[in-house]
Image (tube, rainbow, N blue to C red):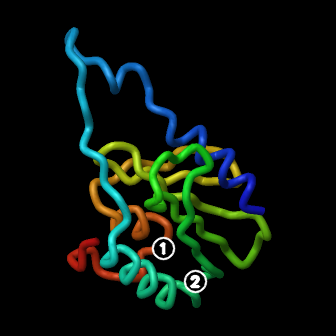
Amino acid sequence: MAQKAFRVAEHATAPSSSAREHAGGVVVPFRQKLLSHHRHYLATWLTASEKMGILDASIESSPDQQTADPSLVVIWVRENADPAYLISLRGPYWVLTDCLRDNELGRYRTFSEALHTIRPVLPLHASA
Protein backbone atom coordinates (compact mmCIF):
# COMPACT_ATOMS: atom_id res chain seq x y z
CA MET A 1 0.00 0.00 0.00
CA ALA A 2 2.53 2.56 1.10
CA GLN A 3 4.93 1.62 -1.72
CA LYS A 4 2.67 3.31 -4.27
CA ALA A 5 2.67 6.44 -2.12
CA PHE A 6 6.46 6.35 -1.99
CA ARG A 7 6.67 6.01 -5.79
CA VAL A 8 4.44 9.07 -6.07
CA ALA A 9 6.55 10.79 -3.39
CA GLU A 10 9.77 10.22 -5.33
CA HIS A 11 8.16 11.88 -8.34
CA ALA A 12 6.62 14.69 -6.27
CA THR A 13 9.80 15.57 -4.37
CA ALA A 14 12.19 15.63 -7.36
CA PRO A 15 13.33 19.23 -7.86
CA SER A 16 12.75 20.77 -11.26
CA SER A 17 15.61 22.45 -13.09
CA SER A 18 13.55 25.62 -13.60
CA ALA A 19 13.09 25.95 -9.83
CA ARG A 20 16.83 25.73 -9.22
CA GLU A 21 17.92 28.32 -11.76
CA HIS A 22 16.50 31.78 -12.24
CA ALA A 23 17.98 34.56 -14.40
CA GLY A 24 21.41 32.94 -14.48
CA GLY A 25 21.63 32.65 -10.69
CA VAL A 26 20.95 29.82 -8.34
CA VAL A 27 17.86 29.99 -6.15
CA VAL A 28 18.14 28.16 -2.84
CA PRO A 29 14.63 27.57 -1.45
CA PHE A 30 14.02 27.47 2.28
CA ARG A 31 13.16 23.98 3.43
CA GLN A 32 10.30 23.44 5.83
CA LYS A 33 9.79 20.41 8.00
CA LEU A 34 6.99 18.82 9.96
CA LEU A 35 6.85 20.31 13.44
CA SER A 36 4.88 19.39 16.54
CA HIS A 37 2.11 21.88 15.73
CA HIS A 38 1.69 20.23 12.31
CA ARG A 39 1.30 16.85 14.02
CA HIS A 40 -1.29 18.31 16.41
CA TYR A 41 -3.19 19.94 13.54
CA LEU A 42 -3.11 16.66 11.58
CA ALA A 43 -4.55 14.77 14.57
CA THR A 44 -7.31 17.37 15.00
CA TRP A 45 -8.07 17.35 11.27
CA LEU A 46 -8.11 13.53 11.18
CA THR A 47 -10.62 13.36 14.03
CA ALA A 48 -12.84 15.99 12.40
CA SER A 49 -12.71 14.35 8.96
CA GLU A 50 -13.47 10.75 9.99
CA LYS A 51 -17.18 11.31 9.29
CA MET A 52 -16.26 12.49 5.79
CA GLY A 53 -14.49 9.30 4.73
CA ILE A 54 -10.92 9.83 5.90
CA LEU A 55 -9.67 6.60 7.44
CA ASP A 56 -6.12 7.23 8.62
CA ALA A 57 -2.96 9.27 8.15
CA SER A 58 0.69 8.60 8.85
CA ILE A 59 3.85 10.65 8.86
CA GLU A 60 6.65 8.97 6.91
CA SER A 61 10.12 9.63 5.60
CA SER A 62 10.73 9.71 1.87
CA PRO A 63 12.68 6.69 0.57
CA ASP A 64 15.40 8.97 -0.83
CA GLN A 65 15.45 11.36 2.13
CA GLN A 66 18.86 12.17 3.57
CA THR A 67 17.71 13.62 6.91
CA ALA A 68 16.03 11.87 9.82
CA ASP A 69 13.09 14.31 9.82
CA PRO A 70 9.94 12.81 8.27
CA SER A 71 8.59 14.90 5.41
CA LEU A 72 5.61 12.99 4.01
CA VAL A 73 2.03 12.77 5.21
CA VAL A 74 0.19 9.79 3.72
CA ILE A 75 -3.62 9.83 3.95
CA TRP A 76 -6.03 6.93 3.42
CA VAL A 77 -9.77 7.06 2.71
CA ARG A 78 -12.30 4.36 3.59
CA GLU A 79 -13.09 3.45 -0.02
CA ASN A 80 -9.61 2.26 -1.01
CA ALA A 81 -6.83 0.18 0.53
CA ASP A 82 -4.16 2.21 -1.27
CA PRO A 83 -3.11 5.64 0.01
CA ALA A 84 -5.35 8.36 -1.43
CA TYR A 85 -3.31 11.51 -0.79
CA LEU A 86 0.26 12.47 -0.14
CA ILE A 87 1.45 15.78 1.27
CA SER A 88 5.15 16.35 0.73
CA LEU A 89 7.50 19.27 1.23
CA ARG A 90 9.13 20.98 -1.72
CA GLY A 91 11.07 24.05 -0.67
CA PRO A 92 8.63 26.48 0.97
CA TYR A 93 5.54 24.66 -0.33
CA TRP A 94 3.36 21.80 0.86
CA VAL A 95 2.60 19.76 -2.28
CA LEU A 96 -0.67 17.81 -2.32
CA THR A 97 -0.72 14.78 -4.62
CA ASP A 98 -3.58 12.44 -5.52
CA CYS A 99 -1.86 9.06 -5.13
CA LEU A 100 -4.56 7.09 -6.93
CA ARG A 101 -4.19 9.13 -10.13
CA ASP A 102 -0.56 10.26 -9.62
CA ASN A 103 -1.66 13.87 -10.08
CA GLU A 104 -0.42 16.98 -8.28
CA LEU A 105 -3.47 18.79 -6.90
CA GLY A 106 -1.75 21.95 -5.71
CA ARG A 107 1.02 23.70 -3.82
CA TYR A 108 0.23 25.52 -0.61
CA ARG A 109 2.05 27.90 1.70
CA THR A 110 0.57 26.28 4.82
CA PHE A 111 -0.03 22.71 5.91
CA SER A 112 -3.60 23.57 6.92
CA GLU A 113 -4.42 24.77 3.37
CA ALA A 114 -3.29 21.43 1.94
CA LEU A 115 -5.45 19.49 4.41
CA HIS A 116 -8.36 21.90 3.82
CA THR A 117 -8.23 21.04 0.11
CA ILE A 118 -8.75 17.35 0.92
CA ARG A 119 -11.57 17.87 3.43
CA PRO A 120 -12.56 21.38 4.62
CA VAL A 121 -13.49 20.36 8.17
CA LEU A 122 -11.51 22.94 10.18
CA PRO A 123 -11.43 26.73 9.85
CA LEU A 124 -8.41 28.01 7.94
CA HIS A 125 -7.57 30.75 10.45
CA ALA A 126 -6.20 28.00 12.73
CA SER A 127 -3.11 27.87 10.56
CA ALA A 128 -0.50 25.16 10.67
Compared across the picture, whether 98 is left or right of 107 comes to right
Q: Residues within 10 Å of mark 1 (few under 14, many from 20)?
A: some
x and y, in percent, of residue 59 in the image = 53, 69
The tag on residue 52 is 2
Decide which of tag 2 and tag 1 comes sooner along the chain.
2
x and y, in percent, of residue 75 in the image = 59, 69
Q: Residue at x 58, y 73 (%)?
A: 58
Above or below residue 8? Residue 127 is below
Q: Amino acid at mark 1?
A: Arg
Q: Are marks 2 and 1 in contact (CB under 8 Å)?
A: yes
Q: Residue at x 45, y 52 (%)?
A: 67
Q: Amino acid at mark 2?
A: Met
Count of numbered tags = 2
Instruction: Specify the quadrant that holds the C terminus.
Output: bottom left
Residue that numbered label 1 is attached to: 119
x and y, in percent, of residue 96 in the image = 48, 54
Q: Residue at x 76, y 64 (%)?
A: 82
Q: Residue at x 58, y 83 (%)?
A: 52
Above or below residue 101? Residue 37 is below
Compared across the picture, whether 79 is left or right of 13 comes to right
Q: Quadrant of residue 84?
A: bottom right
Helix, strand or loop at label 2? It is helix
x and y, in percent, of residue 3 in the image = 74, 54
Helix, strand or loop at label 1? It is loop
